[in-house]
Amino acid sequence: MSNVTRYADIAALRSTDRDQIKEQINAVCHDLETLGRDLKAVVSIHRDEALNQAAGLDVATSTDSPLAGVPLAHKALFRRMGWPDEGGSKSHKGAVATETAHVISQLDHAGAMDCGRLVTVEFAFGVTGHNDYSGTPENPWHRDYICGGSSSGSAAVVAAGLVPVALGTDTGGSIRLPAAACGLFGIKPTHGLVSRQGVFPLSPALDTVGPLARSLKDAATVLEAILGFDAGDPESLSVAMPSLTDHMNDGLDGLRIGRMERYFLEGSETEVADSTAEVIDTLGKLGGHVVDVDCPDIETGSPLTAILSATESVQIHDRTIMENHQAMNPQTVMRILAGMFTSEAQYQKMLALRGAMARQIITTLFEKIDLLVTPVWPFLLPDAKASDAGANPDAASLVQKIGHNTRPFNWLGLPVVVVPVGLDDNGLPMAVQLVGPPFSEAMLIRAARVLENHYAFWDNRPPLSS
Amino acid sequence: MSMSEKQKHTQRDRLHGAGIDDEQLDLADKTSEALLALLDAQPLTDTADEPLRDVMVTFSRNPRP
């Protein structure tokens, strides 16, 4: 296994020397071909295309880019013209992308090298990571355990040290759950901050795009490169964002840290709730001001996200269901079918209710606090067998609860940063999520940086990669 | 507000014709009913027609540093 890329961060990989970039690309592609495939996390590797990118790198314009020459790989939903576009589904076997995603073009422009595509749950519609067709990625911290989903391959490959950052998508927790399961920083940005144009959709009202990384600075650097208005995404917004990295070391400086006992802590397993409470206390000791809050309507966000995503998935996948559902995983079929009985009036009510709830909750909750800290997974990470709803009917109720803490913030469109804070008794990562008002990514990153320094999670190493 | 029984039957017939079996349709219908009942129970004022994007726009004018 190459030592060139293992655990290297963006700063170490950044280069405008074409020979060095090619060496790094070869090393990453080799690692993806070996350990990446061994982890069942890789869909396709594009060494020749990446080497062509290196040969064509505009050194003059890349000099100031923090991503110049940095090899990356992304979830298989991010389209690049001519590359596979199966959405993780046998029903789309052989499909090829006819467009390139806006965020991929932005990373190209920043000088990043695109080395491949990583496993996703079928159509991104699942939270455990199981995929009978593309493979179910194994968690580098313990191979019997899941990576979570749906950005399962992205999390596995970054945690194993093969690339510093990978993009994922989050419709109900699909960046945050895998990031937490694999000990990574994951950022689900504010709805509208990052374009979804050219990204295989699940639910356009809810889909977001963001990075998973081993270091907060790497996650922030990639988010900074991909945010911004894009006319190709009807939900995209033009916002004058502050720098995400310039003030990340400024500390908490009296930030009001929200603790919500009801729903989030009471609704999570004791060990998870205790760990989160300890993190909140730590933030209080490190310069934050802890405030107990409640938010009466927050619990409706989870089931409403479930029915909204199912309803919109029908609009996208109806034809596949009608013509080729035999090629789909039965669990995915069931999730889509649940949206088949929504009337147009109910769909419109969901959208109107969502806007009204978001305005009310954002206004009242963030009047009292600057950010909210909650668990990500509501229980300790389950292993692959216990969470396989296809093979184990008892897993169905467990799977339904996984998005308990994550879905409400898709419903509200809020930014969230996942921070790894330690290991459980099984040696699997534990994490918290920091939630802020719209476009507060810079503040969340500043608070997350305090936790990154305090817990120094990446002083640990997954057993697979030591 | 909800799908009429006739609309539901038409949808079921269409899916049945595509090879989706009754057991799957019953389970999907049951899941859908539970989630949509929760939606139907939510109060919504006549003036609440602001999409999330518009809400986000109002909060985008002064991003938190």
Image (cartoon, coloured by chain):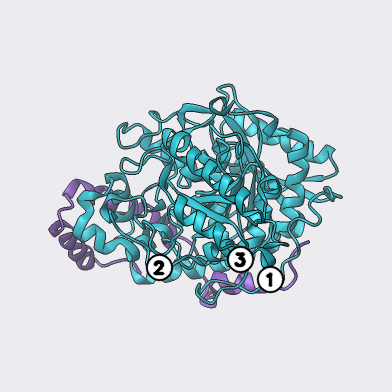
Residue bearing mark 3: A193
* Residue A294 in view here: no
Image point (45%, 35%), residue name: A34
Q: Which mark is residue A347?
A: 2
Question: In the picture, residue A418 is in which quadrant?
Answer: top right
Q: Is residue A85 left or right of residue A265?
A: left
What is the secondary structure assignment of the residue under circle 2? helix
Of all chains, the one bearing label 1 is B
Establish if A256 lies above or below A339: above
- Amino acid at circle 1: Ser
Q: Nearer the viewer, residue B56 or A361?
A: B56
Q: Nearer the viewer, mark 1 or mark 3?
A: 3
Which residue does the numbered mark 1 point to in the structure image? B60
Residue located at (38% from left, 28% from top): A385
Rendered hue of chain B is purple
Total number of numbered labels?
3
Outermost residue on the front side: it is: A19
Q: Which chain is cyan?
A: A
Give the left or right position of residue A321, taking residue A345 as reference.
left
Q: Position of residue A11 (x, y in %)?
A: 71, 48
**How far apart are the two marked residues, 3 and 2, measured between alpha carbons?**
24 Å
